[in-house]
Amino acid sequence: MRRTTGRSHGPARHSRPRTLALPLALALLVPVGVLTAGPLSPAAASPAAEAATTSAATPSVTSREEVNARLTAQAQGRRIEVVEARTESTTLWANPDGTMSVESFAGPVRFKERGRWVGVDLTLVRNPDGSVGPKAHPRGLRLAGRTEASGGDLVTLGRGEQELALGWKGALPEPRLNGAKATYDDVLPGTDLVVEATRTGFEQYLVVADRQAAEHAADLTLPVRTEGITARQGADETLTLTDARTGASVGRGSTPYMWDAGAGGENAPGARTARIDLGVTERADGFDLRVRADRGFLTDKATRYPVTIDPAVYFGPDFDTYVRNGDTADFSAGVDLRVGREFQKGEARSFVNFPRHPSVTGQDVLNAELNLFATWSDGCTPRSWEIWDTGTASAATRWSTQPSWRTKVTASTQTHGHTDCGPRWISEDITSLVRQWSKTANTVDTIGLRATDENDATAFKIFASAQTSTAPSILVTYETPADPVKDHVVYWNDVLQETYRQVGGAPGPLARAGAMMHGAIYDAANSARCAEGALKCLGDPYLVKATASNGALPDVNSAIDHAAFDVLRSVYPALNFDDEIAAARATIPAAVTAAQRAAGTEVGQKAAAAMIAARQSDGSAPVAPYTGSTQPGFWRPTGTGDGATPQWGLVKPFGMATSAQFRSTGPVGHTQMSTLLPSQAYADQVNDVKNLGRAESTTRTADQTKAALFWANDLDGTYKPPGQLFDHTQILSRQHGTTVVGNAKLFALTAFAMADAGIVAWDQKYQTSIDLWRPESAIRLDGDGNANTSADANWQPLSQDRNGQHFSPPFPAYTSGHATFAGAWSKATQAWFGTDQITWTATTEDPNALGVTRTFTTISAAATENAVGRVWLGVHYRWDGTDGVNAGGNAAAYGVANKLKPNTAANWTAYETLHNLSGCQAVGKRLVAEHRWTSYQCTQVQAPGPDHTLYVK
């Protein structure tokens, strides 16, 4: 899974007191930017059409802006927002591992004011003119301060030609402010007036203390002043608001209700409810709302006081609601999303519409989480509830007209909100659903919430709606299309492979160059990360932990670039790498300062210098040619030249303790040619390759022929065996989303393993008593003294050059270099990814197999096929491969266990604090997967906040 990044939520909002309510929901269906900029544009009534309007206003983000964000995220090791992609309710980030994350809220989290984005802040403050308002509100919400007896506007929403104001007849005292709430005491005898700011409007309610006070509040007329808006009342007591010029629907008013304090007390659900009679009388400048409560309800002895009357007004295209069995009300104006059976009421289900950020459509979704803020539960005992994919909800959604419930995504038992397990954020994995959504072109997506057992009253829950400061959100992380610029470790690996093509020759020196370059890259990247603090190190240094003299934090990519550049031009002085370093440096984002670049350059150069110094006199210098022997069994030239790099078995290892540390005893345990050649095992091996490896073999299958040529890459001009295995490493790295610094370690360990594999194989080839001849010599020549073999002077191996000439590589057969490289690569990659079970498809550069692809389901299977492919190619015996795979694997295992080891701590150590549990777990898993630390745990900082501290050891 993927990580998911953390994100900030507003402060926890507790469920407001529920008493007697008369809700009026007026939701103006227009984008935030339109309302704040001037007159309303016509908008359709359906949420899907509303979302389409918002989507059309979404700024176009160029690929360059996203690429820059991705490069900056990789360079700085943190997520970077793509600012140009912001909308009112969505945020797009580039992550350090090259993925993208987008969070979509069910309500606006920001709005544009004077050309700049401003975050919504519902905290009420007093304005210089005596009025009250939130610090930052997308609809320009304004509340009255102290007023005279003549009254006036209590609350005003909107600007320009579209404005709505709810009035109050009578004097208002100076309000008491508490967060998003303003309380006007005793506006009527025994009655307080409370106004609460919401994301796109307000909620206004009267708290009536007792039955005597209810007489004064039972029949009220609330004047509503409008600019450019007309109102029409529906048969179900709802209101429809329309644009006075175009007639288009621009708002809604939900069904009015009232409720008492309930048996559970003032803060508990379970209240008795009753409908309110709502009358609308048009005026020239607006309309009057006459609110008449059910007097029978008010005087009923069962009604528990205090009591609330609750008109709520909302602007905006966001939409969520709940429906309740047996109730025909519109609850879309509320701050609650109810799930399950409430005490003495029917079962409830909730729906939340989310705007689709266009970046998600068509992408490879790696991870998606639904974030809900739980405000109420009847207890703390876990009770199951479900998340579904549903059709789109609208103001017409009722229990009898629910959107289709398509597919259950997941069930959860997370239960919070009760006094003993207070309100908190809940995150649930909905990756499968968002992957399904990404394949469609919708502009709005909807989730449904319901209890698993809708008859169980103890399973009742309430989540915060889009109108609250803790609106629902969906956080999606997805794979990005291939960037024009790869991460810098992979970039220099590509440069290395191109160098292999140009240089050619035996694989040992090529593998040494790869180990030197990638080892220096690791030390450079590790030094850059260590500069951020000891906890940020990638692990143990290989040779050096370099520091920058200017005191700046080194840019990781600059460090990688100069480590690779300096090593390559040292190893290959005849080649010019100036264009490659220039191209790499040109991709470093502008956000990286000159001082950081300079610091990165310095630590990269120091890492390269340490590597170059360590490899001086390492035994790799050329020696006299090896001409072999004319004695039966011993290697002799086969027409491709003298024995190549005979000294390589004496080269100083990169991970092993000594070059001969994992030397095999010999073919089937034979240490002398005199006992090997007469043996039945030898005859079996020769006849095996004679049959399967012959150029025109009829025993070898077509697939075996493809596999043999696929793995060959013996010819100069190809990336050779080390390059092919590096290419496979790139594929696996991409599939697992390995970060830049993760690649620095992965490629170093793989490179060390293959460099040591070359030393192990060449030690066996040249430094033992058996430098075994190639199959073509054994088969063509008579004289091995074995009665069970027969010579065939016309036999040729399948292996061939670009001109169709058959050949054998110029060094002894035992053991196989290809197989030893494969065994080392297999063991190193299995250790890194923690499994052998990985599926991937790769191609080849061998000119005789261009276009051939092979798919593997395990890493070890690829190594085995590589080894046995040399038999099918006719250039090796089967034991060359099996012993080579084992020796290479042993060398790699030793190097992995002893080099670049992860950080360790005796006790749990705080690494960093992230914004939610999922984000914390994603980072922790990444640190362990990339072998930076061995284990992690996430601990919540303080309930109900979503922040979690990541601990490592």
Image (cartoon, rainbow, N blue to C red):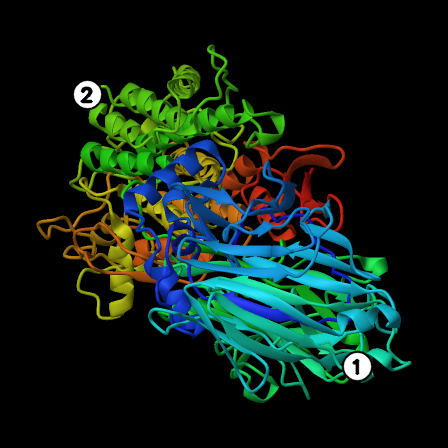
The residue wearing badge 2 is: 574
Q: Is residue 80 above or below residue 228?
A: above
Q: With 442 as the anchor, is 337 left or right in this view? A: right
Q: Position of residue 730 (x, y in %)?
A: 37, 46
Pick the front one: 143 or 492? 143
Q: Secondary structure at mark 2?
A: loop
- Kindly indicate whether the residue at mark 2 contacts the one at mark 1 (C-beta within 8 angstroms): no
Picture residue at 33% right of the left edge, 51% below the top: 59
Q: Total marks drawn?
A: 2
Q: CA distance from mark 1 to mark 2?
A: 98 Å
Pick the front one: 332 or 706? 332
Mark 2 burial class by Cα count in 10 Å: few <14, some 14-19, many 20+: few
Q: Secondary structure at mark 1?
A: helix
User: Label 2 is placed on what type of residue?
Assistant: Ala
Which quadrant of the figure contains the N terminus?
bottom right
Q: Position of residue 470 (x, y in %)?
A: 63, 55
Picture residue at 27% right of the left edge, 26% below the top: 581
Pick the front one: 782 or 827? 827
Q: Is residue 752 above or below residue 424?
A: above
Q: With 894 as the anchor, is 229 left or right in this view? A: left
Q: Position of residue 25 (x, y in %)?
A: 58, 69
**Nearer the viewer's eye, disc 1 or disc 2?**
1
User: Label 1 is placed on what type of residue?
Assistant: Arg
- Residue 666 shows in the view: no
The residue wearing badge 1 is: 295
Most extreme residue toward the front, as rendered? 150
Picture residue at 52% right of the left edge, 28% below the top: 529
Most extreme residue toward the top, as rendered? 549
